[in-house]
Amino acid sequence: MADSSMGRVRALPAHYRRKTPVNTSNPTYGAATSMRTALSKVPEVTLYFWIIKVLCTTVGETFADFINGKLGDNLTTTTLVMGSLLVVALVVQFRTSQYVPVVYWVTVVLISVVGTLITDNMVEHFNVSLTTSTIVFAILMFASFGAWYASEKTLSIHSIYTAKREAFYWTAILFTFALGTAAGDLIGEQYSLGYFKSILLYAGIIALIALAHFKFRLNAIFAFWAAYVITRPLGASIGDWLSQPRTPSEDDPTAQKGLGLGTTVTSFIFLAAIVVVVVVMTQQQRRQRANA
């Protein structure tokens, strides 16, 4: 049965219709699972997924700074421009009938940029401390997960085949990016850990999550979202480490030294890498459909 807010079932696109729960002991379980995967609006979690996720989070940090500089260091204007582009990308994403690599990952890049800008606005325009921002976004993220689970009884990304679940998904994604930006800046800059040490810290946490999942059978959904959240400050730290000056500004006591590549070079290196990985993923998807 479809949600009453979505109209009658026959009026819905096929990819947004609810599916009847499948009995795993049934011989047709494998086929049904494949069907649900095909209907899902998000990619399979593979090595490519994690590579491009880190690339997107890095771009979210550096490209936000790059665009803000091009628009005259006006965070409000930059946020409005990038927010508008995100709305367009989300409209296209919601209208697709299945996972489309280009559409999906463009949306992730934009939501990464907007998440960074939201945190920057809170800190610079509204004088909200990074500690408070981190707490606020953590609460909002957990609240979004709680509302999602209360409504749908699952947080699996492979169940994203209804408009409601997709809305919950992208809301949670936005808060993970905003939280990652705030927490990353808090630890790397305000607590003076430094960008490179922050990279090692977050990479180590992700490695521990992976070990707990594969060795000690940590719940797959919990492990996925835990790693997903941590990849944000990991990518942001990589971006800052590559782009920030070798000699920190004396006017900013929290500034940390980087490799000095600048936001322009760093952003376009990682954007080019994203394009390459998306092309590879698109070709793989086409081959899989051809062989299906």
Image (cartoon, rainbow, N blue to C red):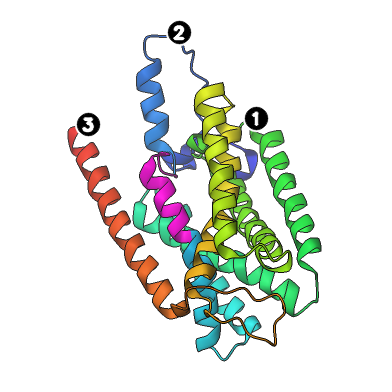
**Which residue is labeled 2 in the image?**
25
In this view, which residue lies farthest toward the bottom? 72
Up-down: is 3 above or below 268? above
Question: Going by the image, does 82 lie left or right of 27?
Answer: right
Label 3 environment density (alpha carbons within 10 Å; few <14, some 14–19, many ≥20) = few
Boundaries of the magenta span: 42-56
Identified by mark 1, the residue type is Lys
Q: Position of residue 217 (x, y in %)?
A: 55, 22
Q: Is residue 38 magenta?
A: no
Say what secondary structure mark 1 lies in.
loop
Main SS type for the magenta part? Answer: helix
Marks 2 and 1, how far apart at CA? 21 Å
Q: Residue at x 44, y 44 (%)?
A: 41
Say what secondary structure mark 3 lies in.
loop
**Which quadrant holds the C terminus?**
top left
Label number found at residue 153: 1
Mark 1 or mark 3, earlier in chain:
1
Question: Going by the image, does 12 lie left or right of 140?
Answer: left
Q: Position of residue 162 (x, y in %)?
A: 52, 41
Say what secondary structure mark 2 lies in.
loop
**Which quadrant holds the N terminus?**
top right
**Which residue is labeled 3 in the image?**
292
Image quadrant where residue 79 sits: bottom right
Q: Position of residue 50 (x, y in %)?
A: 43, 47
Question: Going by the image, does 105 lie left or right of 193?
Answer: left
Q: Is residue 52 magenta?
A: yes
Q: Position of residue 105 (x, y in %)?
A: 42, 57
